[in-house]
Amino acid sequence: MTKLDHIRAYLNQEEANIAIFSDPVTVNYLIGFNCDPHERQMFLFVYNDLAPVLFVPALEVARAESILDFPVFGYMDSENPWQKIKAVLPSTDSKKVLAEFDNLNVTKFQGLQTVFDGRFENLTPYVQHMRLIKSQDEIEKMRLAGDYADKAVQIGFDNISLDVTETDIIAQIEFEMKKIGINKMSFDTMVLTGNNAANPHGIPGTNKIENDALLLFDLGVEKNGYMSDMTRTVAVGKPDQFKKDIYELCLEAQLTAQDFIKLGVTAAEVDAVARNVIEKAGYGEYFNHRLGHGIGMDVHEFPSIMAGNDLVLEEGMCFSVEPGIYIPGKVGVRIEDCGHVTTSGFEVFTKTPKDLLYFEG
Ligand SMILES: [Mn+2]
């Protein structure tokens, strides 16, 4: 069964005639058409018993038609997209209309309501569920994205110097990645020195790399539509024993959680295993975020590895394991790998070593 067949089966089960996809990542996931329409409108309409229809800005029609085997319609900037949708769709008749609520802003929702009379119901949970279990092909793509993250962080390591700033190192990483054909990082690369790393949402800037301190790299690469995400914290010069102890504690939490992951345990249990290590040492209050997030075509997707999530882990689920300890004004450490659940445990996509690495200032 293709992914669209699964959608059709779900429509029949829900006794609905149409599903509307508006999230560009979902559209890419379902039909392999990668397009960011920005503020313009793009929808994939999937019927239970008619051919699907892709509706895009006019400038995207030729590219879409070249890869799709079903009808594509476009609209000019000067046209009303909702009138155009109503005119081109083979049917707008459905008692229930399934749509991705997490992606519908009010403009889209009100526009679609002028096209369809049916009752709108939320398709987001079904899409999240579909994307939760990765196929072998998807795992391969995640591995490749992970390889590039390892390369990227190595470039960061190679550029550590007390003469440069956080953004200098970021510029080098992204410059070198572009030169080997990487179009896009998964998110804004973070390089945080000293106390700036003690803020879990620290923003890189023109801070010079500090000596005798820790330096945090959080980055990822998009390759073939799939994301990687990793964090490494390294030593510059000779950080004091306290900083090294916090590093070792964070590493112990991360490795304990990774070893614990297996089929049948819950997401909440994985979070608790890591959290217990840090809490027992007395630093629980400084680990103030969930242990991890799902990853795939989006850098944050399901499942959330956190307290309260009783989702049972299954083969093919992909997520991060990223404990952090942030003591304001003193030290910040985070260690992160993403991986996938296998029949024998958890296999990570990033291989950069995790023993505390030391660099000359
Ligand atoms: Mn992450």
Image (spheres, rainbow, N blue to C red):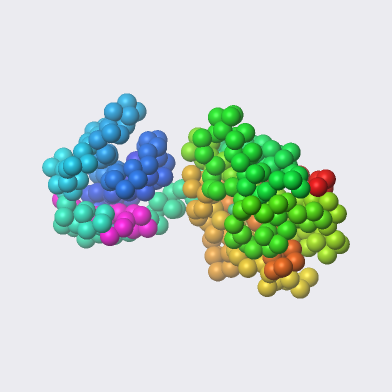
Is 63 left, or right, of 133 in this rendering?
Answer: left
Residue 16 in picture, x, y percent from top left: 24, 53
Residue interval drawn in magenta? 93-106
From this viewpoint, which residue is outermost toward the top?
66
Q: State the residue at coordinates (17%, 46%).
A: 80
Front in this rendered view, residue 291 or 52: 291
Residue 312 in picture, x, y percent from top left: 56, 59
Q: State the residue at coordinates (52%, 39%).
A: 184
Front in this rendered view, residue 239 or 283: 239
Question: Residue 155 appears in which quarter of the rendering?
Answer: top right
Residue 139 in sight:
no
Question: Residue 277 appears in which quarter of the rendering?
Answer: bottom right
Count of labels shown?
A: 0
Residue 59 in picture, x, y percent from top left: 28, 34
Residue 31 in sight:
yes
Residue 199 in picture, x, y percent from top left: 64, 63
Is 148 left, or right, of 249 in this rendering?
Answer: left
Location of the N terminus (image quadrant):
top left
Is 24 left, or right, of 232 in this rendering?
Answer: left
Picture layout, residue 302 above or below residue 28: below
Picture layout, residue 299 above or below residue 325: above
Q: State the residue at coordinates (83%, 45%).
A: 360
Q: Is residue 173 magenta?
A: no
Front in this rendered view, residue 65 or 348: 65
Picture layout, residue 218 above or below residue 110: above
Front in this rendered view, residue 20 or 324: 324
Q: State the residue at coordinates (16%, 40%).
A: 88
Q: Is residue 100 magenta?
A: yes
